């Protein structure tokens, strides 16, 4: 199941993650072009068409320059962050020392947004630019900033773009352009600044075809223009860049990574060619032609090979099992290592394996149970081997590190029959004592039996070999845990790549269905990463898809895992092995979220509707499955469009025991509500207020079975140290393109970061006042959410649960959140609000006649949230 309640779309680990595959349309920026438009046919920044509004964090490397021309006018140019003090833009942009740069936002004029500001120290245009007019070659410049960029304030919204390698060619057919410039409005180009960042998918056009199209234009338009080898062309009818977009990026998705391929340069300046960039393609400076220029003018701080997106990881020392070093090596090379954050990969462990007469070897592993670890079979270890977990540090005796000892190492019985390059490189490790779970140490979900993944990328982690500043592989232990985003390959493609290697490298490599392949040039796993995880984000959580097994050991292929992809053991092929060797303690189905604690009410009552627009709203189902609630006062922030009470209304039904909300599936159970008891203090100040909790009493006890169970309650006023929780529901979801506001046909869930009340209050305080009306978070509430992850309309009343000491505990009830624009999607900026269950133990006990207390559980009560039956019209 994909994910989330509020459209869980996991976004990314790389510092320059750029947008989903389905990128739409155009973008641009108004104000006159960055340089005064000459009266001739060409104009910096082509017209834009089909612009789609970007959400905050979607293009984290995009910046805007505001260039003062007179006391009353300014020009706008775009740019792309390529280092902490360096930005790439167009040479024709009239940027000078002191020019203001805005970054970290999609709405630069919104002072309540996330805008950050920098100032230009120096502007370095290419020395050959302008010799024949701005429509000529070399339209590229480097901007040096006075102060380093602040990457930590809103780390999700600011990032460094990935540069191409020198003279890199692309065979992709489309790219993406973006900016705040001229935009389309009712089939007209509006030459003024767009309030929000826009983007568009544009076809790429070969230089030969591009020049042929320009030659067909009137001579006074093209002036005999010829496309050079250092330029690119792109555009279509009503799709492209426009005035104000000059200097901004043309991005191409290559092997799963967004690359800065071009810089917006110029285009035809008169209709119909301004908007029809299929007839008159936009011209972009080809970044791959200027790697030497970039390196020289950034004093070597930025190079075309230095930005392999968040990087790889690896682990030094020789592999835990010696192999023929001229051929295969456990753990592929790593490149571009990025440091992990505390709690980001809590399942990662490190084994220190003693080897006679040699330094100890390192292997990674993944927590799959409180006494069980999954690793590689070639990481052979004896009882008593030390395991470190709960830390990012590789140093022995690190202050926050926890240790455990191996009781038994159980490798797959078929491993090693034909050599290290063969199958079945998997082992289960049993520990002598249960692990201490926390926000920094927890198990990872397993795939289902023989599960196939449609995702194009995975994430690998470890402490192994890494790159030095000169891009040389350092075969030493990394002091901190590293991670890398790596593209996945089909087995056929992977085998084909291995077959092309020298014979002495590949003679033992015949891949099977129980293996996976991943890696890129400068990204992958290496020595010391053996046994560690390859995880895939399925939209709501990470799943352990693979175990680091082996790779090529020669330097060229050790570094370039696009030529020789790393090979990983496919976990989904070994579900029976895992269940058998753990005595059934761990199974491939044991990590799915129990549907027993996410229930929905279905009512056949009439629905009243209104067209009111409300910033704050509880999540509610749209369509036939919904919550009903009572009529209540309207505030300036809320307009209830329909209000009906559950209290005492016969026929209210509860569906449980199924992931299908229709109630028609064979496993569905139906129960009747006999009474609905809301908190007496709820709604005194409007439904955005606290005490949003209610108890539904059922007519008959619930029928418990393997799929239906009660959830644990917290103790009174219990505090939790866990850093994340799980939300579930059938509400609005993201289909990969848009938010779908209707009942999801299957139950979704998402892993969401928990946010302290202080931090939550601070984030809400930064939101526009007309969204929040100065709302303050109460101590009886909780906050959670992240970019693309949270709850939505239809999820109200559902659970927020945490894994605490091996059991799920119900800590929160979905209450409300912001309902407008990007903040509906970005619940890191505008966290969702949940009722804190631990604050209501007395209410629960009293209204269940003592049948349910915060330390016991009854079979006849289900928790719900008082849910307004509200329909809203809103704009994304």
Image (cartoon, rainbow, N blue to C red):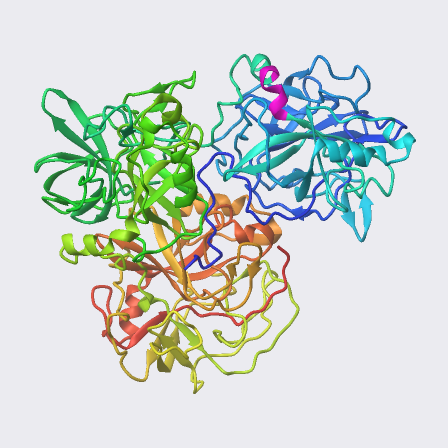
- The question of residue 565 being in magenta is answered with no
Q: Position of residue 779 (x, y in %)?
A: 38, 53
Q: Residue at the location (59% across, 15% down)?
A: 292
Q: Position of residue 620 (x, y in %)?
A: 50, 68
Outermost residue, bottom side? 650
Q: Main secondary structure of the magenta part?
A: helix
Q: In the rendered view, would you say 149 is above or below 607?
A: above
Q: In the rendered view, would you say 724 is above or below 355?
A: below
Q: Residue at the location (87% across, 26% down)?
A: 223
Q: In the rendered view, would you say 793 is above or below 572?
A: below
| 315 vs 401, nearest the viewer | 315
Q: Position of residue 204 (x, y in %)?
A: 67, 38
Q: Which residues are magenta?
A: 287-293
264 displayed left or right of 295: right
Does the image show residue 62? yes
Rendered image quadrant of residue 781 = bottom left
Total numbered circles: 0
Q: Position of residue 541 (x, y in %)?
A: 38, 51
| 766 vs 473, nearest the viewer | 473
363 displayed left or right of 506: left
Where is the N terminus found, in terms of image quarters? bottom left
Q: In the rendered view, would you say 617 is above or below 751?
A: below
Q: Residue at the location (84% across, 40% down)?
A: 273
| 204 vs 417, nearest the viewer | 417
526 displayed left or right of 796: left
Rendered image quadrant of residue 67 = top right
Where is the C terminus found, in terms of image quarters? bottom right
Does the image show residue 397? no
């Amino acid at each position: 199941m994909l994910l989330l309640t509020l459209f869980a779309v996991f976004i990314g680990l790389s510092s320059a993650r750029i947008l989903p595959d389905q990128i739409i349309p155009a973008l641009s920026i108004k104000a006159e072009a960055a340089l005064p438009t000459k009266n001739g046919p060409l104009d910096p920044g082509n017209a834009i068409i089909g612009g789609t509004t970007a959400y905050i964090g979607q293009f984290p490397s995009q910046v805007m320059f505001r260039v003062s021309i007179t006391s009353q006018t300014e020009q706008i140019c775009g740019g792309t962050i390529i280092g902490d003090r360096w930005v790439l833009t167009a040479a024709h942009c009239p940027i000078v020392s002191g020019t203001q740069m805005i970054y970290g936002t999609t709405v630069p004029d919104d002072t309540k947004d996330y805008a950050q500001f920098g100032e230009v120290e120096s502007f370095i245009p290419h020395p050959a630019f302008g010799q024949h007019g701005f429509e000529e070659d070399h339209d590229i410049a480097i901007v040096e900033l006075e102060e380093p960029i602040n990457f930590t304030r809103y780390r999700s919204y600011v990032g460094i773009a990935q540069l191409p390698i020198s003279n890199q060619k692309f065979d992709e057919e489309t790219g993406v352009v973006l900016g705040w410039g001229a935009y389309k409005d009712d089939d007209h180009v509006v030459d003024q600044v767009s309030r929000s960042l826009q983007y568009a998918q544009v076809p790429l056009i070969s230089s030969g075809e591009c020049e042929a199209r320009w030659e067909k234009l009137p001579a006074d338009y093209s002036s005999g223009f010829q496309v050079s080898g250092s330029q690119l062309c792109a555009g279509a009818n009503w799709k492209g860049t426009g005035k104000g977009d000059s200097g901004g990026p043309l991005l191409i998705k290559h092997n799963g990574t967004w690359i800065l391929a071009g810089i917006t340069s110029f285009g035809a300046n008169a209709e119909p060619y301004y908007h029809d960039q299929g007839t008159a393609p936009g011209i972009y400076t080809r970044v791959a032609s200027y790697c030497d220029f970039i390196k020289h003018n950034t004093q070597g701080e930025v190079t075309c090979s230095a930005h392999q997106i968040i990087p790889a990881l690896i682990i030094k020392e020789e592999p835990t099992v010696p192999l023929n070093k001229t051929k295969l090596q456990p753990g592929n090379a790593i490149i571009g290592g990025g440091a992990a954050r505390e709690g980001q990969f809590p399942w990662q462990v490190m084994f220190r394996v003693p080897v006679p007469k040699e330094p100890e070897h390192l292997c990674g592993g993944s927590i799959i149970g409180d006494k069980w670890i999954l690793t590689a079979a070639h990481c052979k270890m004896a009882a008593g081997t030390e395991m470190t977990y709960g830390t990012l540090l590789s140093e022995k005796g690190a202050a926050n590190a926890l240790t455990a000892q191996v009781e038994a190492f159980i490798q797959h019985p078929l491993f090693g029959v034909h050599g290290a390059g063969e199958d079945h490189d998997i082992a289960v490790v049993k520990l002598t004592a249960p692990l201490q779970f926390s926000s920094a140490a927890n198990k990872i979900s397993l795939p289902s039996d023989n599960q196939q993944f449609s995702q194009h990328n995975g994430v690998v982690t470890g402490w192994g070999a890494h790159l030095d500043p000169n891009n040389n592989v350092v075969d030493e232990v990394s002091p901190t845990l590293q991670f890398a985003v790596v593209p996945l390959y089909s087995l056929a493609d992977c085998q084909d790549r291995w077959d092309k290697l020298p014979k002495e490298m590949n003679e033992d490599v015949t891949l099977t269905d129980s293996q996976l392949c991943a890696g890129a040039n400068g990204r992958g796993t290496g020595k010391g990463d053996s046994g560690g995880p390859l995880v895939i984000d399925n939209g709501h959580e990470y799943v352990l898809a693979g175990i680091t097994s082996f790779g090529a050991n020669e330097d060229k292929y050790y570094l370039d895992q696009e030529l020789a992809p790393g090979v990983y053991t496919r976990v989904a092929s070994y579900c029976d092995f895992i269940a058998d060797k753990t005595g059934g303690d761990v199974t491939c189905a044991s990590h799915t979220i129990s549907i027993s604690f996410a229930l929905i009410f279905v009512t056949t009552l009439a629905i009243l509707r209104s067209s009111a627009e409300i910033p704050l709203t509880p999540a509610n189902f749209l369509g036939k499955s919904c919550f009903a609630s009572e009529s209540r006062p309207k505030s300036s922030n809320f307009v209830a469009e329909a209000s009906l009470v559950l209290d005492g209304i016969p026929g209210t039904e509860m569906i449980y025991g199924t992931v299908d909300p229709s109630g028609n599936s064979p496993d569905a159970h139906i129960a009747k509500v006999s009474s609905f008891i809301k908190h007496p203090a709820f709604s005194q100040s409007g439904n955005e207020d606290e005490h949003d909790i209610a108890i539904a009493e059922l007519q008959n006890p619930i029928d418990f079975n393997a799929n239906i169970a009660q959830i644990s309650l917290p103790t009174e006023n219990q505090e939790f140290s866990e850093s994340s929780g799980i939300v579930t529901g059938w509400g609005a979801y993201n289909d990969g393109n848009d938010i779908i506001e209707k009942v999801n046909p299957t139950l979704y869930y998402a892993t969401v970061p928990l946010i302290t009340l202080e931090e939550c209050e601070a984030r809400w305080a930064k939101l526009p006042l007309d969204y929040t009306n100065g709302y303050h978070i109460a101590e009886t509430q909780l906050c959670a959410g992240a970019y693309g992850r949270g709850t939505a309309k239809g999820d109200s009343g559902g659970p927020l649960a945490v894994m605490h000491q091996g059991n799920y505990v119900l800590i929160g009830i979905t209450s409300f959140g912001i309902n407008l624009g990007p903040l509906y999607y970005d619940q890191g900026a505008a966290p969702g609000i949940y009722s804190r269950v631990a604050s209501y133990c007395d209410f629960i006990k009293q209204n269940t006649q003592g049948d349910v207390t915060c330390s016991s559980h009854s079979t006849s009560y289900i928790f719900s949230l008082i849910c307004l039956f509200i329909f809203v019209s809103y704009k994304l």
